[in-house]
Amino acid sequence: MDSVLLLQAFSSYFSILLSILQCKVSVLSNLGRVFISFLDTMLSLNFRLCSMSPCTISLDDRTTMHFWTPNHRQINKPTLVLIHGYGGNSRWQFFTQVWPLSRSFNLYVPDLLFFGKSYTNWTARSELFQARCIREGLKRLSVNKFSIVGISYGGYVTYRMAEIYQDEVEKVVIMSSGICYTDDQKEEQLKKIGRNVFDLIVPEKAQDMRLFINLCIYKSSPFKLIPNFFLMGFVQTICKKNRKEKLELAEHMLSRKADSNLPILTKKTLLIWGEKDNVFPVFLAHQLQRHLGSESRLAILKDSGHAVNIDSPNMVNELIKSFVLG
């Protein structure tokens, strides 16, 4: 009889404890989303303090592109376009760039399709389609001449823009973008990462988000200390949106064969790479420079990883300014 009562009491206490834990998890999850939403607002404020405003453009009845644009275009400043990669939208990826670069340039910062507020119902998932949509959006904003910066996946899009819009693009900056790899090199690198890469770049779990951060950022960073419930807030608030389409973009990029006839860009091109890049190792930077030839130069930043703009923001900003303005 005593054992039955003890078991009932244990079951009752366990049920209460489980309810408390579930409530705590729910509270932390909500707190994470609130925190990320607050940061998202602060990042928007950061852009606004740089005299920039959000703008959404309908390219057709199925496609909208979202840009951050200058409040007042200054004729004495050149125009610079920043194209982000995976790991958030334009505000999250370029928060260390907009303030210093907006002092020297008319900045235009689009959200790629399926990131932020950019979206399409078309089934195209290529970097070429992304490039054409950005160019059409810039055209609607009366931007006809510009230099362009792209990081990681955004570097692929940047390369295509420089290839097909030679009359409009003036100078090119590509950061941490494995454009010039062979099929064997790609396969070997995917094995080294040791995880399903789609789970990392479009994560559904806080643990995968943390692995992605540790893979991309080399230096000690506040990002590496964020508690799991905040990371889960980022996953639920930022990554979950249009997840299916983001995966399709990544699948298109990773599944296709290496381009043996990759065009050589005719524009002056600066390559910026982190020496400790664990996503696109630095040997890919040297391969790309050899492919581009004399019109390119390579800057390798020590103690920096794939997210070179976060590991070494001041150096990256100075390199961009001196190259584009030089």
Image: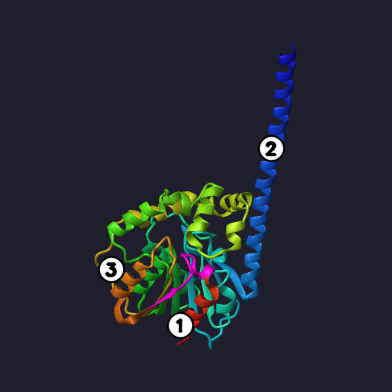
Q: Decide if residue 291 is on the left or right side of residue 217.
A: left
Please tell me whether residue 193 belongs to the stretch shown in magenta. Answer: no
Please tell me whether residue 308 belongs to the stretch shown in magenta. Answer: yes
Residue matched to label 1: 324
Looking at the image, tell me whether mark 2 or mark 1 is earlier in sequence order. 2
Classed neighbour count for the residue bearing mark 1: other residues with Cα under 10 Å, few (<14), some (14–19), many (≥20)? many
Looking at the image, tell me whether mark 2 or mark 3 is earlier in sequence order. 2
Q: Find residue 262 and name its label.
A: 3
Residue 47 in the image, given as x and y percentages of width and height: 61, 71
Residue at image coords 53%, 88%: 76
Quadrant in which the C terminus is drawn? bottom left
Whether 3 is drawn above or below 286: the answer is above
Between disc 2 and disc 3, the foreground one is 2
Per the rendered image, the range of residues in magenta is: 298-311
Residue 182 in the image, given as x and y percentages of width and height: 28, 61
Residue at image coords 73%, 19%: 6
Q: Amino acid at mark 3?
A: Leu
Give 270 or 17, whichever is nearer the viewer.
Answer: 17
Classed neighbour count for the residue bearing mark 2: other residues with Cα under 10 Å, few (<14), some (14–19), many (≥20)? few
Q: Cα distance, mark 3 to mark 1?
A: 24 Å
The answer to whether residue 132 is visible is no
For mark 1, give the secondary structure.
Answer: helix
